[in-house]
């Protein structure tokens, strides 16, 4: 039976190449029940995965606390997570990836951290005993985005997480950014903590994705880097690129001009065209940066861009003068 | 509610609401907090009700605890504790948002500003200004890493914005709250606050000399590396000061310049075609001209996007109209 007010809702977004889901369910249950937590397990997926979720439906019919959510369009993992979390009955959401990643015995410890005040608790796989390819992929990801955590996170890619969903309300989540939830949550001044967990025993197999998936990851990382560092100051990003590009172009044009004046030929070499091309590209980049600044300037509006931890606490205390 | 800008202080009717808010952003300044509060207290003894808004910008030392202790003994001292380190601009904005006085004074938390100058700032504000900026006499800083970059930056800011402020880096400033309500600080814009106030609120601005002390506690928070950032911000500021209400004009001017270049290359290709070396030059020069034409088209389109965005933002009606002051005959 599904409890009316469970302690935690486990959300499993089934997006790509899931492992056997029934097995996963049976891995989620023991740590939670032995910790005395009441729970529901929500599998969020698409209609075309019905073949995979059919055994779960059978389990649910037998009275297991399983809920199946379907989203009609492939709107991405974040959309599945948000849909499931808003349908969840518990204030604390646990996310578990649909494939073996970190050992799930860590789940109660994650819930405990959130109950003690963390907004988000993330499993940190250590020691890494999974396949070399998986470790290499994690390492590359960390090389790009790890510094955004300001040294506070050692494993940004682990999908085993517990969170207080009300705290996530102000964290802008869309597209594929649920993957980087800890980084974005840190940025929004949420309290993010890591709990060390062993690698899942079955995570020894290398996970290799299609080239399209890696391309999307790359785009995600680029977007994340830009958004976290330059959202408020687009010109710092575009301006640097534009200044360097148009500067190089301008130098080329000066060289061409000097050669032409001294009687050289410019037509049989592409330097003139390359120079003009770089100069115009640079100006375009700067102009785009200025449009970005205009958008920031006009949309700053009345909204507050900071979060306050405490304000005037002395005033509200009865013993204060 | 703020009483507008007819008068800084009321007729002497003492209320519990402060009429002056002193806003100080603090980042890792636990040693400075005590002396700072003492200095403010003794400087503002004879002044109408005031409050001291101390904004802790995610300090990692005991700054927030020190302030909280002081706030418990003196209700005029308030602690605004930000959830993480947001930087000086957002910390100041947080202080401005929390300030309740009709007049707001901002200053540094490192004791380099002297609160004893506040009464003179207030007097200058009452004389009919919306913003009074202090400039540091006998600046007690290193020449090469602090004074020279700041001299260059101030010159550039004055040149570009037309707002004549000698010392944009001095935090000791006084504002009417009506001015602050018409502007919003973002990015690192606290450095250009007077120029921003002039551009967005139409503020009347003046400056007076203030004292400057050498740093007593803690370490300086920034160095030479900010020059590049300041240059990018200056470009933004230029645009906002000149083209805030007509972005299409900015991009249109750029497009015009690109068209002039295109025309130049066009003429050159015509000359090349007619001349002896025609065949070869007549290939690259028209191509170069076309690239400039392309840039011009692109700039016009960008300008239209910017203009459309301005239109949307204005119809949302969030921005308050600039201040205009009625002059009595």
Image (cartoon, helix red, strand yellow):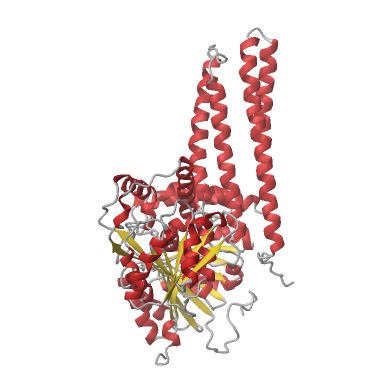
Q: Is residue A123 left or right of residue A281?
A: left
Whole-percent x, y for residue B272 in the image: 66, 13
Residue displayed at 57% across by 87% down? B12
Camera-side residue of B68 and B14: B68
Up-down relation of residue B50 to residue B242 (above or below)? below
Quadrant housing residue A93: bottom left
Camera-side residue of B213 and B241: B241
Residue displayed at 44% across by 86% down? A315
Whole-percent x, y for residue B267 in the image: 69, 20
Whole-percent x, y for residue B180 in the image: 57, 68
Quadrant housing residue A7: bottom left
Residue B208 shows in this picture: no
Quadrant housing residue A96: bottom left
Up-down relation of residue A280 to residue B205 (above or below)? above
Q: Is residue B63 left or right of residue A268?
A: left
Q: Across the whole image, how many numbered discs are drawn on residues?
A: 0
Up-down relation of residue B232 to residue A99 (above or below)? above
Whole-percent x, y for residue A165 in the image: 47, 70
Camera-side residue of B198 and A9: A9
Query: The N terminus of chain B appears in which quarter of the rendering?
Result: bottom right
Residue A168 shows in this picture: yes
Query: The C terminus of chain B appears in which quarter of the rendering?
Result: bottom right
Camera-side residue of B290 and B214: B290
Residue displayed at 61% across by 19% down? B284
Q: Residue furthest top?
A: B276
Q: Residue furthest right?
A: B329
């Amino acid at each position: 039976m599904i409890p009316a007010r469970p302690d935690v809702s486990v959300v499993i977004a089934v997006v790509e190449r899931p492992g056997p889901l029934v097995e996963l369910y049976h891995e989620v249950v023991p740590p939670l029940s032995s910790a005395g937590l009441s729970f529901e397990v929500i599998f969020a997926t698409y209609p075309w995965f019905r073949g995979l979720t059919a055994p779960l439906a059978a389990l649910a019919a037998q009275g297991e606390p399983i809920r199946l959510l379907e989203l009609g369009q492939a709107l991405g993992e974040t959309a599945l997570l948000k849909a499931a979390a808003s349908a969840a009955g518990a204030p604390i959401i646990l996310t578990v990836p649909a494939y073996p990643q970190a050992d799930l015995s860590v789940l109660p410890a994650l819930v405990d951290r959130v109950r003690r005040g963390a907004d988000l608790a993330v499993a940190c796989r250590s020691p890494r005993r999974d396949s070399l390819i998986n470790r290499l992929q994690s390492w590359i990801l960390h090389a790009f985005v790890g510094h955004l955590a300001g040294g506070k996170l050692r494993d940004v890619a682990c999908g085993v997480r517990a969170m207080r969903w009300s705290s996530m309300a102000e964290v802008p989540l869309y597209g594929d950014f649920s993957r980087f939830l800890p980084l974005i949550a840190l940025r929004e001044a949420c309290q993010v903590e890591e709990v060390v967990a062993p690698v899942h025993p079955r995570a020894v197999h290398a996970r290799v994705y299609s080239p399209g998936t890696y391309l999307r990851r790359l785009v995600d990382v680029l977007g994340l880097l830009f958004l976290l560092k330059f959202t408020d100051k687009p010109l710092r990003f575009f301006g640097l690129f534009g200044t360097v590009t148009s500067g190089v172009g301008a130098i080329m044009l000066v060289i061409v001009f000097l050669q032409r004046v001294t009687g050289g030929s410019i037509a049989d070499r592409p330097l003139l065209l390359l120079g003009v091309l770089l100069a115009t590209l640079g100006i375009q980049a700067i102009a785009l940066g200025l449009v970005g600044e205009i958008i920031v300037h006009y949309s700053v509006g009345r909204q507050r861009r900071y979060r306050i931890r405490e304000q005037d606490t002395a005033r509200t205390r009865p013993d204060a003068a | 509610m703020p009483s507008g800008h007819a008068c800084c202080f009321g007729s002497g009717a003492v209320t519990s609401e402060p009429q002056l808010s002193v806003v100080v952003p603090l980042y890792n300044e636990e040693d400075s907090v005590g002396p700072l509060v003492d200095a403010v207290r003794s400087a503002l003894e004879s002044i109408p009700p005031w409050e001291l808004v101390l904004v802790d910008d995610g300090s990692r030392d005991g700054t927030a605890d020190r302030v909280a202790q002081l706030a418990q003994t003196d209700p005029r001292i308030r602690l605004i504790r930000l959830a993480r380190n947001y930087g000086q601009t957002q910390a100041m904005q947080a202080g401005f948002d929390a300030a309740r006085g009709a007049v707001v004074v901002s200053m540094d938390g490192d004791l380099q500003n002297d609160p004893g100058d506040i009464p003179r700032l207030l007097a200058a504000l009452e004389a009919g200004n919306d913003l009074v900026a202090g400039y540091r006499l006998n600046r007690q800083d290193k020449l090469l890493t602090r004074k020279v970059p700041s001299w260059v930056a101030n010159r550039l800011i004055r040149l570009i914005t037309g707002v004549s402020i000698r010392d944009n880096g001095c935090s000791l400033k006084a504002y009417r709250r009506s001015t602050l309500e018409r502007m919003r600080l973002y990015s690192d814009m606290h450095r250009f606050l007077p120029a921003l106030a002039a551009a967005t609120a139409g503020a009347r601005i003046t400056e007076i000399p203030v004292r400057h002390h050498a740093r007593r506690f803690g370490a300086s928070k920034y160095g030479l590396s900010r020059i590049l950032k300041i240059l990018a911000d200056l470009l933004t500021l230029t645009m906002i000061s000149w083209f805030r209400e007509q972005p299409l004009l900015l991009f249109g001017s750029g497009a015009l310049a690109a068209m002039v270049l295109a025309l130049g290359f066009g003429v050159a290709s015509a000359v090349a075609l007619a001349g002896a070396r025609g065949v070869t030059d007549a290939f690259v020069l028209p191509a170069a001209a076309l690239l400039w034409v392309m840039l011009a088209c692109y700039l016009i389109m960008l300008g239209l996007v910017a203009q459309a965005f301005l239109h949307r933002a204005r119809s949302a009606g969030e921005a308050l109209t600039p201040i205009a002051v009625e002059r009595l005959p």
